[in-house]
Image: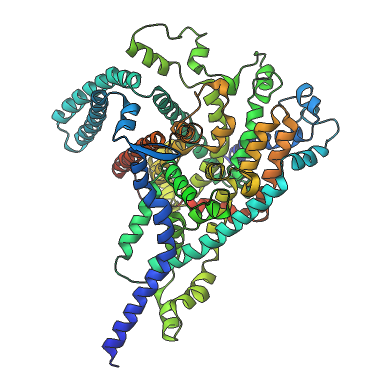
Amino acid sequence: MDLRSYKRVRRRKDNLTGYLFILPSVLIISIFGIFPVFFTLYVSLHKWRIKRSRFLGLANYGELFGNVWYLLIVVAALGGIALAGYLLSRTKSSSRPRFTISGVFVLLIALAALAVFVPYLAEAGDGGMFGSMRVTIWYSLGTVPVQLGLGLLLASFLYQKIPAKQVFRVVYLLPYIVPSVASAAVFERLFSLKPESFANQVLALFGRSPMQWLLEPKGIFLLMSGERMAATSENIIANYWLSWAQGPSLALLSIMFFNWWVFVGYYTLIYTNGLANIPRQLYEAAEVDGAGKLTVFFRITLPLLSPTTYFLTLLGIIGTFKAFAHIYVLRHPAARGEVDPMSVQIFFTFFRKSRFGYAAAMSLLLFVIVLVLTLVQRRIMKERVHYG
Amino acid sequence: MGRSGSSWLKVLLVVLLAMGAFVSIIPFLYMVSHSLKSLAETVTRSSAIPFDPRFWPRVPQWVNYKVAWQEARFGLYFRNSVIITAVTICGLLVTSSLSAFAFAKLRFPGRDLVFSILLATLMIPQTVLLIPNFIVVAKLGWIDRLPALTVPFLASAFHIFLLRQFFSQIPDELLESARIDGASHLRSLLSIVVPLSKAPIFTVAFLSFIYTWNSLQWPLVVTQTPRWRPIAVGLTVFITEAGPETHLRLAGAVIAVIPVITMYFIAQRQFTEAITRSGLKE
C-alpha cells in the first residue's frame, strides 16, 4: 500500500471516529432539545388535551392575542423603538442632527402607539397571560439591577486584601447551592402572614403592624399610597396603566427577597473573578497619572467588567423567564396569580388545566420574547462592551 | 491615605462582608432552630434575632426528624435521588467528554456546523421543551420510570462547550506522539486528555449534581407515584401535606439540604471554582 492511500484510509477512519464520538450527544440533544421546538409548533396548532384532537390552525394564537390588528400595531411600535434606538446611536458617530431629530420623532410616535394599543391588546387577549407578562417584567426589574449592584459592591470589598476570603466565598454561595425547594420552604415561613413570622417580627422591631407578605396580591405602591390608587375608572387605557402604577404585589416583592438572597452571592463570586482578570498595570498607570478612586472605578473597573455585567444581566433576565421551583413553593392562592411569571402560568395551563395545545402556543411566545431579548442585548452590548 | 486610615477601612469592609454573610445564614439558622421546636413553640416562641433565646427551642425536639422521615417516605426519595443523580452524572461525563474531544481535537466534515447547532440549543428555554418532551416520554411509556428522569439529561451542549474549551488548550503534539505510538483516539482521550482535565471534569460533575439533585419541574411532571420521585418532588408534596406544621416542614427541608451541604463543605474549593468557571462563558 502506498503512502497516499494509507493516509486516505486513515482520514476516513478518523472521520468515522469523530462521528461515533459525537453520536450519543447529538442523538440525545436532537431528540430532547431540537426536535421538541418543532413539535411544540405542531402541538400549538391543535386542540390537544392530553391527547391530540383536532387541527385548529392559528386559533390558539388567536385566543392568546385576541385581535390581530392590535398585535400588529404593538409589534410595529416595538420595531419603531428599535429603529429609534438605532438612529439615536448613529448620532454619536456621525454627529448629524438629522438622526437625532428623526430618532426622537420615531421614538415618541412608537411610545404613544404603545401607550394606547397595549391596553387594548391586553383587554382583547388572554388577561392571565398579559398579567403574567407584567409579573415577569416587574420580577426582572426588581431582581437583576439589585443583584448586579450588591454583587459588585460585595465583590469589590472581597477583592481587597482581607482575611478569611474563602470563608466569605463559601458562605455567600451557600444559598445558591442548596435545593431551592428546601430554601423556599423556609422563606414560605419567614414571609407568612402570621404575626410570629420572621418578616412580621422584624416589622415589630420597628413598631409596625404585621403584613400579609406572600399572601398579599395588592401592589406595593398601592399599599404605600394608602390604597388611594385603586382602579375606579371605566377607561381601558387608564385602568391598564393604573395596574402598572400600583407596582409589583407585596407577594412578588417577598419572592424578590428570596431571589436576592439566592443570587447576590453568586453574582459576587462571578464579579470577583471578573475583577481578578483586570490587569494590575492599568491601576498602576492610573495611579501614576494621579486619577482619583472614583475616576478609576468609572473609567477602568466598570468598563472592563462589562463582559461580566453583560453575562450576568442576560443570565438574570432569562432566569426570570424560567423561574419555577421557588415560585411553585412560595405561591399561595391568596396572592391570586400576582406572583406567577409566564413560565409558571404556562406550567399550570399545561399541567393543571391539561390544555397542551394552548400552553404550547404560550411557550412559543415566551421563546420569541427570550430570543428577541437575547438578540437585542447582543446588539447593544456589541457597541458598548469592552472586551479588554 | 494614611496607614491607620486604610486599616480602619479594612475593618469596615470585613464588618460589611460579615453582615452579608450573616444575612445569607439567617434562613439556615431559622430552618434548623424551627425544625427542632415543638408545634406549640413555633407559634408562641419566636423572634427575628438569632441571638435571642426565643429564636431557639427550649428543648431540641430531635424526634421531629424521625416523624418527618417516616411520614414522607424520605428514605425512598433519597434512594431515588441518589440513583438518578449518579446515572445522570456518569452518562453525562461519558457523552460530553467524547464529543468535547471530537469537537476539539478531531477533524471531520461538518464538525463546526454541528457544534454551532448544538450551541444554539442553549438559547431554548426549558419551558418550550416541557410539553413536547412530556408527550414523547408518555408515548414511550416512561412515566414513573427511571429513563424519563435520566435519559433526556444524558447529554448537554453546555457541558460539551465547557469541556471543549479546556480540551482545545491541550497541545496537539502530545496527542500526535501517542498516535505515532499506535494509540487509538479513545486510548489517547482516556490516558492523556482525561488525566490532564481533572478540574473541568469535576466542574461538569458538580454542576450536574447540583442541577439534578435540585430540579423540580420535570420530575414533578413525569412522576405520578412515589416510585421514582426524587427528593425535591417528595419535599414539595410533603410541604403541601404538612400544612401548618412548621416544625415538620422544616425538618423535611433540613433532610433535603444535608447531602448537598455536606458535599459542598467537603469539596468547597472545587465547588466555588466550578461555579466561577460556569460563569466564564461569554
In this rendering, the answer to whether B141 lies above or below A245 is below
Question: Percent position (x, y) of residue B184?
Answer: 45, 80
- Seen in the image, is B7 located left or right of residue B98? right
- Seen in the image, is A143 located left or right of residue A104? right
Q: In which quarter of the image is residue B233?
A: top right
The answer to which of A43 and B9 lies nearer the viewer is: A43
Q: Which residue is drawn at 52% across and 8% down?
A: A226
The answer to which of B137 and A201 lies nearer the viewer is: B137
Q: Which of the image's four quarters has the N terminus of chain A?
A: bottom left
Give the number of marks: 0
Question: Percent position (x, y) of residue A319?
Answer: 46, 39
Single out the residue that lies furthest toward the right.
B59
Asked if residue A126 shows in the view, the reply is yes
Q: In which quarter of the image is residue B270?
A: bottom right
Image coloring type: rainbow
Single out the residue that lies furthest toward the bottom.
A1
Q: Which residue is drawn at 55% across and 57% down?
A: B88
In this rendering, the answer to whether A320 lies above or below A287 is above
Q: Residue at x 72, y 30 (%)?
A: B246
Asked if residue B8 shows in the view, the reply is no
Question: Percent position (x, y) of residue B21?
Answer: 64, 38
